[in-house]
């Protein structure tokens, strides 16, 4: 009995000592991820004629970028992978999950569990964004073709590519298409596009030496000096505007028109292609892709067939047996999916390339395609109708609050409102309910709803603007 107690005391004293981590045998990150061991490094250095890695580094790294001394890092503690994972989890646990009604192309959504489990969390789908080996990528190619078909059907355009990075970069890519088409070095951007889109367009234009003008497109009488016009539909304030006259004026001046849109809204409202738009872009995020703190999300770009050769990225197509000439790329003579169009400089001559950035979000585009298949056309329309109905209910209730008024323009899921309550008080009330809204410089406020909105969400939004809690479930 006493021997056991003495042994326990010795064990306790041992663990109370300052013992280095090396005693516990934890593996260092460098040992795991740098292949050659010390003996192999010496053999390689001997072959190259250097005494140490430092000598090799000094010989091959330019003096302008070589660090002569070790950088002064905030922490000198070297963590192993397990300790680093624990630290990251502790930092991530400080995040707070707020309800977001900011909009601007970013919406909460429900990702069906069957898609989340079998695609988003499946390493088999987490492969390079381009299926270079078509023979083993037929399933992914077929899914990407479904994504393209979804975009073409909803936008009423001729062709679409297999995704882009995000809405803002797709807008800049589309305007670059207009420049390649007619070589005019001016772009016109409507003043009601999303601010992040306008910012990226300015950045892209500065590199190309193109002037960007912004304003109300209805006030422009002459588009002859512009290569392209960018419109937002519905716009950043949520308004659904008729752009028929603008499109006609631009086409009379041989200027291309680009339209940034919302795919879910197009299940209920007139498609951009019916207005005669030349190029249609946007984000598909709300169709099954989690917000993920702002990205990544799959964007899309669709255009008329006459502009197909100018489209960036890649396009999936079908090769099938020609009855007359018996041409096929399938050993069995059946239809096969392949990358029909690849216009990046990795694939073709640089001077003919339409883009040199990684223009794809294939995994997320596949998730969007499966989301659309999961719900079907009627299901997507029902989701859109439910979102719009919730927005109508909220607008009706807000307009009944003294000092609160919403815009009278047509809308889908976004309300643009003004209130006599000081903005700081609105912000404080949002913090209390852990809700994010969009605040404009003119003290106006934007509220965008999505498919996840509940009765409690509407109740809390009304409370923020001074409305009473709805305890009778009148919504």
Image (cartoon, rainbow, N blue to C red):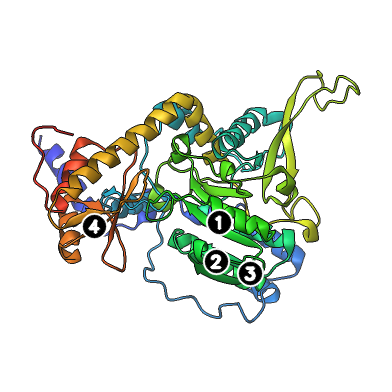
Residue 464 drawn at (x, y percent)? 16, 52
Of the two numbered discs 1 and 3 in the rendering, the one whose residue sits closer to the viewer: 1
Residue for badge 1: 246
Between the C-alphas of marks 1 and 3, the distance is: 17 Å
In the depicted structure, whether residue 265 falls above or below residue 214? above
Residue at image mark 3: 186
Alpha-carbon distance for marks 4 and 2? 78 Å
Earlier sequence position, callout 3 versus callout 4: 4
Q: Secondary structure at mark 4?
A: loop
- Asked if the residue under mark 2 is in contact with the one under mark 1, i.e. CB atoms within 8 Å, the reply is yes
Residue at numbered disc 4: 17
The image shows residue 408 at horizontal and vertical percentages of 31, 51
Residue located beneath label 2 in the image:
220
Distance CA(mark 1)–CA(mark 2): 9 Å
Question: Does the rendering let one see residue 194?
Answer: yes
Towards the viewer: 373 or 52 = 373
């Amino acid at each position: 009995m006493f021997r056991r107690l003495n042994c326990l005391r010795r064990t306790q004293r041992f663990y109370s000592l300052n013992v280095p981590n090396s005693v516990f045998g934890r593996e260092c990150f460098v040992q795991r991820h740098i292949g050659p061991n010390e003996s192999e490094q010496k053999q390689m250095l001997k072959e190259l004629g250097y005494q140490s890695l430092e000598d090799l580094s000094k010989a091959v790294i330019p003096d302008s970028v070589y660090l002569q001394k070790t950088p002064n890092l905030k922490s000198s503690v070297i963590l192993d992978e397990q300790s680093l994972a624990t630290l990251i989890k502790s930092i991530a646990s400080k995040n707070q999950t707020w309800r977001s009604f900011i909009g601007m192309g970013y919406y909460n959504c429900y990702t069906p569990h069957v898609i989340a489990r079998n695609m988003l969390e499946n390493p088999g789908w987490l492969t390079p964004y381009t299926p270079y080996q078509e023979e083993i990528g037929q399933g992914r190619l077929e899914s990407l073709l479904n994504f393209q078909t979804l975009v073409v059907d909803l936008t009423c355009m001729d062709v679409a590519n297999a995704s882009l990075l995000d809405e803002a970069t797709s807008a800049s890519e589309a305007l670059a298409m207009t420049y390649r088409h007619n070589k005019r070095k001016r772009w016109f951007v409507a003043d009601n596009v999303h601010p992040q889109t306008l910012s990226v367009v300015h950045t892209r234009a500065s590199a190309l030496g193109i002037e960007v003008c912004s304003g109300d497109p209805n006030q422009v009488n002459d588009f002859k000096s512009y290569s392209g016009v960018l419109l937002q539909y519905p716009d950043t304030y949520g308004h659904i505007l008729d752009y028929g006259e603008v499109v006609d004026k631009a086409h009379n001046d041989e200027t291309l028109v680009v339209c940034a849109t919302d795919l879910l809204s197009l299940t209920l409202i007139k498609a951009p292609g019916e207005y005669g738009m030349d190029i249609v872009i946007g984000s598909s995020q709300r169709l099954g892709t989690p917000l993920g703190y702002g990205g990544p999300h799959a964007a899309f770009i669709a255009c008329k067939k006459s502009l197909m050769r100018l489209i960036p990225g890649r396009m999936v197509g079908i090769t099938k047996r020609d009855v007359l000439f018996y041409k096929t790329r399938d050993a069995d003579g059946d239809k096969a999916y392949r990358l029909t169009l690849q216009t990046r400089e990795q694939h073709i001559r640089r001077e003919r390339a339409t883009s040199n950035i990684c223009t794809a979000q294939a995994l997320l585009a596949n998730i969007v395609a499966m989301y659309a298949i999961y719900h079907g056309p009627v299901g997507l329309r029902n989701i859109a109708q439910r979102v719009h109905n919730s927005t109508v209910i909220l607008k009706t209730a807000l307009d009944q609050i003294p000092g609160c008024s919403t815009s009278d323009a047509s809308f889908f899921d976004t309300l643009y409102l003004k209130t006599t309550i000081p903005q700081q008080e609105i912000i404080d009330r949002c913090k209390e309910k852990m809700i994010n809204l969009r605040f404009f410089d003119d003290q106006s406020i934007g509220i965008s709803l999505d498919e996840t909105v509940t009765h409690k969400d509407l109740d809390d939004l009304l409370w923020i603007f001074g409305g009473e809690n709805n305890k009778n479930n009148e919504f």
